[in-house]
Protein backbone atom coordinates (compact mmCIF):
# COMPACT_ATOMS: atom_id res chain seq x y z
CA UNK A 1 0.00 0.00 0.00
CA UNK A 2 1.02 3.61 -0.56
CA UNK A 3 -0.69 6.43 1.33
CA UNK A 4 -0.51 9.92 -0.17
CA UNK A 5 -3.46 11.54 1.60
CA UNK A 6 -4.47 12.24 5.18
CA UNK A 7 -6.24 9.54 7.17
CA UNK A 8 -8.12 12.20 9.11
CA UNK A 9 -11.26 11.51 7.11
CA UNK A 10 -11.03 7.80 7.95
CA UNK A 11 -10.73 8.51 11.67
CA UNK A 12 -13.62 10.96 11.46
CA UNK A 13 -15.85 8.22 10.09
CA UNK A 14 -14.91 5.97 13.00
CA UNK A 15 -15.68 8.83 15.39
CA UNK A 16 -19.05 9.22 13.67
CA UNK A 17 -19.95 5.67 14.65
CA UNK A 18 -18.86 3.53 11.73
CA UNK A 19 -17.42 0.28 13.12
CA UNK A 20 -15.02 -0.21 10.21
CA UNK A 21 -13.86 1.69 7.13
CA UNK A 22 -12.73 -0.35 4.13
CA UNK A 23 -12.89 -0.16 0.33
CA UNK A 24 -14.20 -2.15 -2.60
CA UNK A 25 -13.28 -2.37 -6.27
CA UNK A 26 -15.40 -1.14 -9.11
CA UNK A 27 -17.75 1.74 -9.76
CA UNK A 28 -20.30 3.28 -7.48
CA UNK A 29 -20.54 5.79 -4.66
CA UNK A 30 -18.84 5.49 -1.29
CA UNK A 31 -21.16 4.52 1.55
CA UNK A 32 -22.31 1.44 3.49
CA UNK A 33 -20.44 -1.70 2.44
CA UNK A 34 -22.40 -4.18 0.38
CA UNK A 35 -22.48 -7.68 1.79
CA UNK A 36 -21.50 -9.02 -1.63
CA UNK A 37 -17.89 -8.30 -0.74
CA UNK A 38 -15.18 -5.74 -0.10
CA UNK A 39 -11.41 -5.80 0.25
CA UNK A 40 -9.60 -6.67 3.46
CA UNK A 41 -6.35 -5.12 2.21
CA UNK A 42 -7.25 -1.95 4.08
CA UNK A 43 -9.59 -1.90 7.06
CA UNK A 44 -9.67 0.70 9.82
CA UNK A 45 -11.78 -0.26 12.83
CA UNK A 46 -13.02 0.93 16.18
CA UNK A 47 -11.69 -0.97 19.20
CA UNK A 48 -13.75 -4.09 19.98
CA UNK A 49 -15.98 -3.57 16.94
CA UNK A 50 -18.44 -6.41 16.16
CA UNK A 51 -17.12 -6.99 12.65
CA UNK A 52 -13.60 -7.90 13.75
CA UNK A 53 -14.88 -9.71 16.85
CA UNK A 54 -17.00 -11.98 14.64
CA UNK A 55 -14.24 -12.52 12.09
CA UNK A 56 -11.72 -13.44 14.79
CA UNK A 57 -14.18 -15.81 16.52
CA UNK A 58 -14.74 -17.64 13.23
CA UNK A 59 -11.02 -17.77 12.39
CA UNK A 60 -10.17 -19.10 15.85
CA UNK A 61 -12.88 -21.75 15.57
CA UNK A 62 -11.58 -22.98 12.22
CA UNK A 63 -7.96 -23.14 13.44
CA UNK A 64 -8.74 -25.03 16.65
CA UNK A 65 -11.46 -27.40 15.46
CA UNK A 66 -11.01 -31.12 14.85
CA UNK A 67 -11.39 -32.05 11.19
CA UNK A 68 -12.77 -35.38 10.08
CA UNK A 69 -10.53 -38.32 9.29
CA UNK A 70 -8.86 -37.78 5.92
CA UNK A 71 -9.91 -34.12 5.66
CA UNK A 72 -6.34 -32.89 5.98
CA UNK A 73 -6.04 -33.79 2.30
CA UNK A 74 -9.13 -31.80 1.37
CA UNK A 75 -9.62 -28.14 0.47
CA UNK A 76 -10.58 -27.24 4.03
CA UNK A 77 -9.06 -25.24 6.87
CA UNK A 78 -7.55 -27.98 8.98
CA UNK A 79 -4.92 -27.94 11.74
CA UNK A 80 -6.05 -31.01 13.71
CA UNK A 81 -7.34 -34.21 12.14
CA UNK A 82 -9.35 -36.87 13.92
CA UNK A 83 -7.43 -40.09 14.62
CA UNK A 84 -4.22 -38.68 13.13
CA UNK A 85 -0.99 -40.32 14.21
CA UNK A 86 0.99 -37.19 13.37
CA UNK A 87 -0.50 -34.07 14.96
CA UNK A 88 2.59 -31.92 14.39
CA UNK A 89 1.92 -31.07 10.77
CA UNK A 90 1.61 -27.48 9.67
CA UNK A 91 -1.97 -26.29 9.32
CA UNK A 92 -3.53 -26.79 5.93
CA UNK A 93 -5.19 -23.48 4.96
CA UNK A 94 -6.28 -23.11 1.33
CA UNK A 95 -5.60 -19.77 -0.29
CA UNK A 96 -7.81 -16.92 1.02
CA UNK A 97 -10.10 -19.21 3.06
CA UNK A 98 -9.54 -17.25 6.29
CA UNK A 99 -9.92 -13.94 4.45
CA UNK A 100 -13.25 -14.95 2.96
CA UNK A 101 -14.51 -15.56 6.50
CA UNK A 102 -14.76 -11.81 7.04
CA UNK A 103 -18.22 -12.21 5.48
CA UNK A 104 -19.58 -15.44 7.01
CA UNK A 105 -22.03 -15.84 4.13
CA UNK A 106 -18.99 -16.81 2.03
CA UNK A 107 -17.64 -19.38 4.48
CA UNK A 108 -15.74 -21.88 2.27
CA UNK A 109 -17.17 -24.72 4.36
CA UNK A 110 -20.43 -24.18 2.51
CA UNK A 111 -18.83 -25.51 -0.67
CA UNK A 112 -18.65 -29.25 -1.43
CA UNK A 113 -15.36 -30.72 -0.23
CA UNK A 114 -12.74 -31.29 -2.90
CA UNK A 115 -9.34 -32.97 -2.73
CA UNK A 116 -6.30 -30.74 -2.40
CA UNK A 117 -4.16 -31.63 -5.39
CA UNK A 118 -1.06 -29.96 -3.91
CA UNK A 119 -0.66 -32.42 -1.04
CA UNK A 120 1.25 -35.68 -1.09
CA UNK A 121 0.07 -38.87 0.53
CA UNK A 122 2.49 -38.46 3.44
CA UNK A 123 0.55 -35.53 4.89
CA UNK A 124 -2.62 -37.40 5.76
CA UNK A 125 -1.47 -40.47 7.69
CA UNK A 126 -4.10 -41.47 10.27
CA UNK A 127 -4.99 -44.48 12.33
CA UNK A 128 -8.09 -46.67 12.11
CA UNK A 129 -11.01 -45.12 13.96
CA UNK A 130 -12.49 -48.45 15.06
CA UNK A 131 -9.37 -49.10 17.17
CA UNK A 132 -9.71 -45.87 19.18
CA UNK A 133 -11.38 -45.84 22.57
CA UNK A 134 -12.22 -42.15 22.17
CA UNK A 135 -13.81 -42.51 18.74
CA UNK A 136 -17.24 -41.29 19.87
CA UNK A 137 -15.76 -38.20 21.51
CA UNK A 138 -13.71 -37.41 18.43
CA UNK A 139 -16.73 -37.73 16.16
CA UNK A 140 -18.58 -35.29 18.41
CA UNK A 141 -15.70 -32.80 18.16
CA UNK A 142 -15.70 -33.13 14.38
CA UNK A 143 -19.43 -32.39 14.30
CA UNK A 144 -18.91 -29.31 16.47
CA UNK A 145 -16.07 -28.22 14.20
CA UNK A 146 -18.41 -28.22 11.24
CA UNK A 147 -20.97 -25.85 12.78
CA UNK A 148 -21.91 -22.77 10.80
CA UNK A 149 -19.83 -19.64 11.18
CA UNK A 150 -21.14 -16.89 13.42
CA UNK A 151 -22.89 -14.07 11.58
CA UNK A 152 -22.00 -10.39 11.76
CA UNK A 153 -24.41 -8.82 14.28
CA UNK A 154 -27.28 -6.80 12.87
CA UNK A 155 -26.60 -3.09 13.10
CA UNK A 156 -22.84 -3.36 12.48
CA UNK A 157 -21.86 -0.21 10.57
CA UNK A 158 -19.35 -0.78 7.76
CA UNK A 159 -18.28 2.03 5.42
CA UNK A 160 -16.66 1.36 2.03
CA UNK A 161 -14.79 3.74 -0.23
CA UNK A 162 -15.59 2.86 -3.83
CA UNK A 163 -15.69 4.33 -7.31
CA UNK A 164 -13.53 7.47 -7.53
CA UNK A 165 -12.49 7.00 -3.88
CA UNK A 166 -11.62 3.30 -3.98
CA UNK A 167 -8.06 2.41 -3.01
CA UNK A 168 -7.73 0.14 -6.03
CA UNK A 169 -8.40 2.38 -9.05
CA UNK A 170 -6.86 -0.24 -11.37
CA UNK A 171 -7.25 -3.90 -10.54
CA UNK A 172 -3.88 -5.68 -10.33
CA UNK A 173 -1.99 -2.40 -10.85
CA UNK A 174 -0.48 -2.81 -14.31
CA UNK A 175 -1.28 0.85 -14.97
CA UNK A 176 1.45 1.88 -12.51
CA UNK A 177 4.12 0.24 -14.65
CA UNK A 178 3.66 2.36 -17.77
CA UNK A 179 6.45 4.85 -18.51
CA UNK A 180 5.17 8.25 -17.34
CA UNK A 181 6.18 11.76 -18.33
CA UNK A 182 5.48 13.96 -15.28
CA UNK A 183 5.90 17.18 -17.23
CA UNK A 184 3.61 16.23 -20.11
CA UNK A 185 1.28 14.31 -17.73
CA UNK A 186 0.95 11.41 -20.11
CA UNK A 187 2.47 8.09 -21.08
CA UNK A 188 6.09 8.68 -22.04
CA UNK A 189 6.74 7.92 -25.66
CA UNK A 190 9.84 6.22 -27.02
CA UNK A 191 10.30 3.73 -24.23
CA UNK A 192 10.65 0.18 -25.52
CA UNK A 193 12.08 -1.77 -22.57
CA UNK A 194 9.33 -4.26 -21.78
CA UNK A 195 11.39 -5.64 -18.90
CA UNK A 196 11.03 -2.36 -17.00
CA UNK A 197 7.72 -0.95 -18.24
CA UNK A 198 4.28 -2.08 -19.26
CA UNK A 199 4.08 -0.76 -22.81
CA UNK A 200 0.43 -1.57 -23.41
CA UNK A 201 -0.80 1.81 -22.10
CA UNK A 202 -1.43 5.13 -23.79
CA UNK A 203 -2.84 7.47 -21.15
CA UNK A 204 -3.08 11.16 -20.35
CA UNK A 205 -3.99 13.09 -17.20
CA UNK A 206 -6.87 15.53 -17.59
CA UNK A 207 -7.06 18.88 -15.83
CA UNK A 208 -9.62 17.46 -13.38
CA UNK A 209 -7.27 14.68 -12.29
CA UNK A 210 -8.84 11.88 -14.30
CA UNK A 211 -6.64 9.54 -16.33
CA UNK A 212 -7.88 9.04 -19.89
CA UNK A 213 -6.46 5.88 -21.47
CA UNK A 214 -6.86 5.17 -25.16
CA UNK A 215 -5.59 1.66 -24.59
CA UNK A 216 -4.20 -0.51 -21.79
CA UNK A 217 -3.75 -4.05 -20.59
CA UNK A 218 -7.44 -4.65 -21.44
CA UNK A 219 -6.98 -3.80 -25.14
CA UNK A 220 -7.73 -0.78 -27.35
CA UNK A 221 -10.99 0.23 -25.66
CA UNK A 222 -10.91 3.72 -24.14
CA UNK A 223 -11.21 3.87 -20.34
CA UNK A 224 -11.23 6.80 -17.92
CA UNK A 225 -10.02 6.45 -14.32
CA UNK A 226 -11.56 9.22 -12.24
CA UNK A 227 -9.60 11.03 -9.55
CA UNK A 228 -6.55 8.87 -10.21
CA UNK A 229 -4.11 10.85 -8.07
CA UNK A 230 -6.56 12.21 -5.49
CA UNK A 231 -7.21 9.16 -3.37
CA UNK A 232 -6.20 8.60 0.23
CA UNK A 233 -4.19 5.45 -0.45
CA UNK A 234 -3.43 2.94 -3.19
CA UNK A 235 -3.16 -0.82 -3.35
CA UNK A 236 -0.19 -1.19 -5.70
CA UNK A 237 -0.38 -4.99 -6.13
CA UNK A 238 3.42 -5.31 -6.03
Image: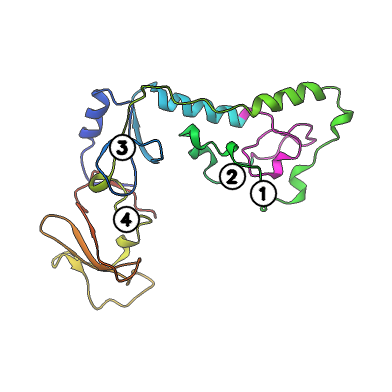
Label 2: which secondary element: loop
Residue 36 rendering spot, x and y as whole percentages: 41, 39
The residue labelled by disc 3 is 160
Callout 1–callout 2 Cβ contact below 8 Å: yes
Mark pair 1, 4: CA separation? 32 Å
Kindly identify which residue carries mark 4: 170
Between discs 2 and 4, the one toward the N terminus = 2
Horizontal and vertical percent position of residue 129: 84, 31
Sequence-first tag of 1 and 2 = 2
How far from the left and from the top, in percent, is residue 179? 27, 68
Give the Cα separation between the discs numbered 3 and 4.
17 Å
Name the secondary structure under disc 4.
loop
Identify the disc placed on residue 94.
2
The disc, 2 or 3, on the residue closer to the chain's N-terminal end is 2
Q: Is residue 224 magenta?
A: no
77 vs 12: above or below: below
Amino acid sequence: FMAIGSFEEVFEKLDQGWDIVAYKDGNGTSGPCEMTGFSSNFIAGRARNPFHATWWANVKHKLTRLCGEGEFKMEKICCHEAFATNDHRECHIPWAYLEWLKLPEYDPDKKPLQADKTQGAHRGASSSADRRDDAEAQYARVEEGNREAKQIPEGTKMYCYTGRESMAPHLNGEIYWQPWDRSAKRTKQGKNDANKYDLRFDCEERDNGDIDCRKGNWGSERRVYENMFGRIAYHLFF
